[in-house]
Image: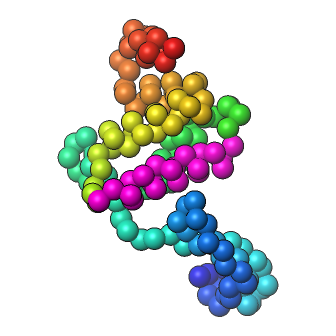
Amino acid sequence: MRCPKCGNADTRVVDSRTQEATNAIKRRRECCGCGFRFTTFERCEDPIEVIKSDGSTQPFDRNKLLVGLMRATSKRDIDLAALNGLIDDIERELRSRTLTAVSSHEIGDMVLKRLEKLDKVAYIRFASVYRDFKDVDEFFKELQNLR
């Protein structure tokens, strides 16, 4: 692991902790060159393939999902930890299945189900992009369903 400050490849692990909720290991590291301390996370490398609407596939990318959630929750009182928890929950559910591929539509539905409980405005923002509303009537219909 390279030091993010000086780029030195010689680092040592100072502390390791299992993150049961996220199925990851959190490691505190120290650079042997400059002494800078930083945190890394190790996650299981068991790829989940996402089947896009055009039929193509790509690996599940939690960062891509996080960016979409951050857009939907911008200027809302929702912290990053809650969004990461939402993504962890989705990833945990996906990994508990025996299938290694899932449709992007199914992931979108999983996000909406959780966003509805977390924040209704973020739900509508995410739904408007995810469901590609064509006009105000579709937007209004979704609002009525939300009530």
* 104 shown above or below 137: below
Viewer-proximal residue, 145 or 72?
A: 145
Residue 146 falls left or right of residue 35: left
Image x and y of residue 144, in percent:
46, 11
Q: Is residue 147 magenta?
A: no
Q: Residue at x 46, y 56 (%)?
A: 92
Q: Above or below — where is 28 with respect to 137?
A: below
Quadrant containing the N terminus in the rendered view: bottom right
* Residue at left offset 22%, top offset 42%: 54
Asked if residue 87 lies in the magenta stretch, the reply is yes
Left or right of residue 98: residue 55: left
User: At x 30% / y 50%, what residue is drawn?
Assistant: 102
Color theme of the render: rainbow
Looking at the rendering, the stretch of residues picked out in magenta corresponds to 79-98
In this orientation, which residue lies closer to the viewer: 65 or 102?
A: 102
Q: Relative to residue 61, is residue 2 drawn left or right?
A: right
Magenta portion: prevailing SS class: helix
**Quarter of the image holding residue 69?**
top right
Residue 73's x, y, as percent? Answer: 60, 34
Marks counted in the figure total: 0
Q: Where is residue 72, by image quadrant?
A: top right
Across and down, in percent, residue 126 comes to: 48, 31
Is 115 in front, or is 5? 115
Q: Which residue extends farthest left?
A: 55
Q: Position of residue 118 (x, y in %)?
A: 59, 34
